Image: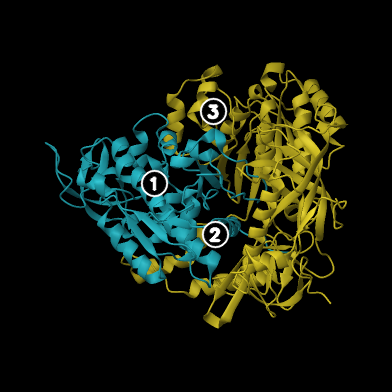
Chain colours: A cyan, B yellow
């Protein structure tokens, strides 16, 4: 009798299969790298898919200028360690206009500094496929997402025009003007991502581990004051709290949780016993009803 | 087969010797906790993909919502969101909100697209694939079912088996689902009547036997109150069987041991200057292979021995169904994407004509003059002729001759290929015996189907068939790619496109096969 293959082995094999299909079918793919834990797993699986050959595509980071400093350090080290062809793109026009996550509504900021530059970069380099770390367990509208998610001209996502996917067959033949987002982690859950990081002993951004950090309490959420661009409102004060992050993004939009989990084992233990879903810490999602679905239709990842 | 546990253990043991790369400052005591990996984050010993299908009003979303609510690790904020929403009968939260995703759907109150949900019990990952019940969404159900290991068919105890139930069973059978569970729901509305349940169960058996199911089980439930979902019902003491959850946990997991003949569809060729590596990357889609065994590329008929089975975690002695690896051969035979490696004795058919059953997925009806491509495991082949012969009447389960076909139809049709492709019948090797029919112009997925017969002889020679020879292509269009890496795959891609253009101009085209290297 054969020993049953564990669920992580099955997920890993499926993701590798998806990477190879996409790399073989698309002319010019790119891996969208957002530095967080999902991207870490995504990158690791991509390396496995093509090992011992090098990654047959570049890695793209959309930098809003408001990421935690630790994230940028980690990104550059990762690129060096793995010999990645890293492309960093920022919406210079938006940055020049001073669009920032503190003074602007999250929906405006996300559009100008995340969605727009992503489209700019995809167009500039003429990428026809972009790998992303989205998972179907993240949010209701993503529960229906395909592995190959097609975007019409202008990167618009139309839920009614997505292609049916059957068995393990992936049809990547593009129509005129179409591009595709590829989601190799579609069937992973947040817990799987952590389990896998632990199993494969992957390096992650230190912000995932609890440490004393300068924080501000705002609207019931704990924010880290990563630099002095986060100005204090009347009555607010900077307090050192022992916190960590379950998800990483732009620091003024990413809430911390108080925690003592200072190493990977305790983070995983805490996550497996967590009582709230990770997106609760992302302030943009609570902006309006069906927020994620709307963002996706506009071209957000 | 017996060697596999060893190879798996070996690769894991190797990984655990690697230095622990943790960014935080660690004391030695903390580091030693890493040894307790299995306690902190146990890997689940298996996975089961469960399709749910039923009519809109049968309470399908409620059933699954209830299962998630009672049996799983739902997060508090998800529970709160539900409790904040409007309640349904008896003051229970509207569990269906856990399943119905898109805003457009919530407004319409129906589920139009398949939704994926994940939950874990102590030992197993469950993947719930929720498919729409509406008749006009047969195609969505078929695509959802193609991913499933087991299907839940849902009926309302007040109405019993409906035409729809039979339709769904036929679709499950078509796409290869082998286990079904009949949930007789809303038992509370028939006073928990055993005779009502037994009658429905008997009705189900009268038609389910004719399909190729290995197992079909009926369970009486009331999803709103949770009876027999995750908790044994006190209202139905006459039912001695398992709850839905118990039954799901008892079914065998997805991919536990290799089945069928060895098949390895080549996805891409990996090259590295390190050790002069040239590996064929792919996922074993059936059976298994060991280092030292001889494998054959059915298309070129060339064979070689397996020299290495490489992964980033170390080489394996054996690769089994479901594993993604890179196979290095002892001879540099020109195998490209689209090839299917097998053992010499049980090869796929080098097919020119296929008899198939397919679900028509596109809003655009069948066009005898349309330009189609056939996507099989890793190959994409121009279709020189697609002929619809009959449609399956899902209500009577009989076939009726037809030469037309449109969305949601289940058609029986013959596909002639512009060049040979390595293909199996679905019953023998599902992953190399299924296909998507692709519109060559828009790229859309037109139909999904299974091969019932694969024939190697060419389609009846048509006087007007134009043969695109390799010599012709090598002289001009492909003169730049001869003897380059990946040349055969690119050669084939260009030939496909030329064939499609000619076909659009009304010319039947065949592409000359790659040279036959067999003696």
Question: Can marks 2 and 1 be said to lie on one chain?
Answer: yes
Residue B100, percent across and down? 54, 30
Circle 3 sits in a helix, a strand or a loop, which is it?
A: helix
Mark toward the start of the polypeptide (2 vs 1): 2
Residue B409 visible at all? yes
Return the mark for residue A119: 1
Instruction: Classify residue B58 by image quadrant.
Output: top right
The CA span between labels 3 and 2 is 40 Å
Q: Residues within 10 Å of mark 3 (few under 14, many from 20)?
A: many
Mark 2 = which residue? A23
Q: Quadrant of the C terminus of chain A?
A: top left
User: Pointers 3 and 2 in contact (CB under 8 A)?
Assistant: no
The residue that appears at 58% across and 78% down in the rendered structure is: B277
Mark 3 = which residue? B95
The residue that appears at 67% across and 45% down in the rendered structure is: B438
Above-or-below relation of A148 to B27: above
User: Pointers 2 and 1 in contact (CB under 8 A)?
Assistant: no
Circle 1 sits in a helix, a strand or a loop, which is it?
A: helix
User: Looking at this view, is B117 or A82 the one in front?
Assistant: A82
Residue B240, percent across and down? 76, 33
Residue A261 visible at all? no
The CA span between labels 1 and 3 is 37 Å
Q: Is residue A21 left or right of residue A277?
A: right
The CA span between labels 2 and 1 is 20 Å
Residue A189, percent across and down? 50, 48
Name, please, the residue furthest toward the bottom: B275
Return the mark for residue A201: none
């Amino acid at each position: 009798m054969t020993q049953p293959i564990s669920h992580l082995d099955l997920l890993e094999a499926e993701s590798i299969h998806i990477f190879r299909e996409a790399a073989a079918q698309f002319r010019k793919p790119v891996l969208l790298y957002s530095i967080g834990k999902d991207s870490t797993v995504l990158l690791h699986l991509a390396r496995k898919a093509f090992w011992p050959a090098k990654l047959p595509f570049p890695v793209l980071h959309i930098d809003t200028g408001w990421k935690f400093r630790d994230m940028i350090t980690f990104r550059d080290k990762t690129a060096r360690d793995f010999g990645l062809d890293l492309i960093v793109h920022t919406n210079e026009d938006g940055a020049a206009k001073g669009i920032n996550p503190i003074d602007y509504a999250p929906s405006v900021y996300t559009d100008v500094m995340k969605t727009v530059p992503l489209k700019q970069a995809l167009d500039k380099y003429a990428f026809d496929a972009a790998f992303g770390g989205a998972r179907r367990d993240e949010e209701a509208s993503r529960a229906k997402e395909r592995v190959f998610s097609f975007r019409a001209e202008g990167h618009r996502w139309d839920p009614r025009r997505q292609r049916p996917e059957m068995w393990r067959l992936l049809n990547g033949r593009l129509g005129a003007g179409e591009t595709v987002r590829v989601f190799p982690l579609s069937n992973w859950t947040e817990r799987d991502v952590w389990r896998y990081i632990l199993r494969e002993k992957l390096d992650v951004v230190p912000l995932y581990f609890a440490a004393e950090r300068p924080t501000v309490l705002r609207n019931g959420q704990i924010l880290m004051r990563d630099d002095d661009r986060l100005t204090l409102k009347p009555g607010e004060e900077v307090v050192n709290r022992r916190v960590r992050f379950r998800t990483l993004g732009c620091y003024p939009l990413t809430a911390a949780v108080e925690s003592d989990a200072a190493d990977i084992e305790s983070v995983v233990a805490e996550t497996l016993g967590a009582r709230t879903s990770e997106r609760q810490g992302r302030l943009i999602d609570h902006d309006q009803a069906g927020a994620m679905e709307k963002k996706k239709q506009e071209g957000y990842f | 087969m017996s060697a596999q546990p060893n190879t798996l253990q070996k690769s894991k043991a190797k990984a655990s010797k690697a230095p622990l790369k943790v960014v935080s400052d660690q004391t030695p005591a903390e580091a030693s906790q890493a040894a307790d990996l299995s306690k902190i984050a146990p890997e689940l010993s298996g996975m089961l993909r469960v399709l749910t299908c039923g009519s809109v009003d049968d309470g399908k979303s409620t059933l699954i919502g209830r299962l998630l609510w009672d049996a799983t690790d739902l997060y508090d904020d998800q529970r709160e969101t539900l409790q904040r929403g409007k309640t349904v009968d008896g003051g229970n939260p509207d569990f269906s909100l856990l399943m119905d995703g898109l805003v457009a759907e919530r407004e319409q109150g129906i589920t139009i697209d398949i939704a994926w949900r994940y939950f874990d019990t102590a030992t197993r990952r469950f993947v719930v694939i929720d498919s729409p019940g509406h008749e006009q969404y047969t195609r969505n159900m078929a695509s959802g079912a193609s991913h499933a290991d087991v299907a839940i068919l849902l009926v309302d105890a007040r109405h019993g088996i409906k035409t729809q139930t039979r339709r769904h069973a036929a679709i499950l059978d078509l796409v290869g689902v082998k286990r079904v569970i009949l949930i007789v729901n809303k038992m509370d509305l028939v006073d928990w009547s055993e005779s009502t349940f037994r009658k429905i169960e008997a009705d189900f058996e009268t038609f389910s036997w004719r399909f190729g199911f290995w197992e079909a089980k009926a369970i009486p439930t009331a999803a709103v109150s949770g009876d027999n979902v995750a908790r044994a019902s006190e209202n139905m003491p006459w039912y001695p069987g398992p709850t839905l959850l118990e039954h799901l946990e008892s079914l065998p997991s997805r991919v536990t041991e290799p089945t069928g003949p060895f098949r390895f569809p080549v996805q891409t060729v990996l090259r590295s200057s390190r050790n002069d590596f040239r590996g064929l990357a792919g996922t074993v889609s059936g059976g298994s292979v060991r280092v030292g065994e001889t494998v054959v590329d059915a298309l070129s008929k060339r064979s070689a021995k397996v020299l290495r089975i490489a992964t980033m975690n170390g080489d394996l002695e054996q690769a089994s169904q479901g594993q993604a690896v890179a196979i290095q051969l002892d001879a540099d035979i020109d195998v490209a994407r689209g090839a299917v490696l097998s053992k010499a004795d049980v090869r796929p058919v080098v097919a020119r004509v296929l008899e198939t059953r397919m679900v028509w997925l596109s809003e655009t009806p069948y066009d005898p003059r349309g330009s189609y491509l056939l996507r099989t495991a890793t190959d994409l082949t121009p279709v020189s002729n697609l002929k619809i012969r009959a449609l399956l009447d899902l209500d009577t389960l009989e076939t009726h001759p037809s030469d037309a076909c449109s969305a949601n139809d289940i058609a029986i049709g013959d596909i002639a290929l512009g060049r040979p492709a390595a293909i199996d019948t679905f019953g023998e090797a599902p992953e190399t015996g299924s296909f998507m029919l692709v519109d060559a112009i828009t790229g859309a997925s037109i139909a999904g189907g299974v091969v019932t017969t694969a024939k190697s002889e060419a389609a009846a020679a048509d006087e007007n068939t134009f043969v695109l020879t390799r010599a012709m292509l090598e002289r001009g269009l492909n003169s730049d790619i001869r003897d380059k890496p990946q040349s055969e795959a690119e050669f084939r891609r260009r030939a496909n496109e030329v064939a499609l253009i000619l076909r659009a101009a009304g010319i039947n085209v065949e592409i000359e096969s790659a040279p036959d290297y067999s003696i």
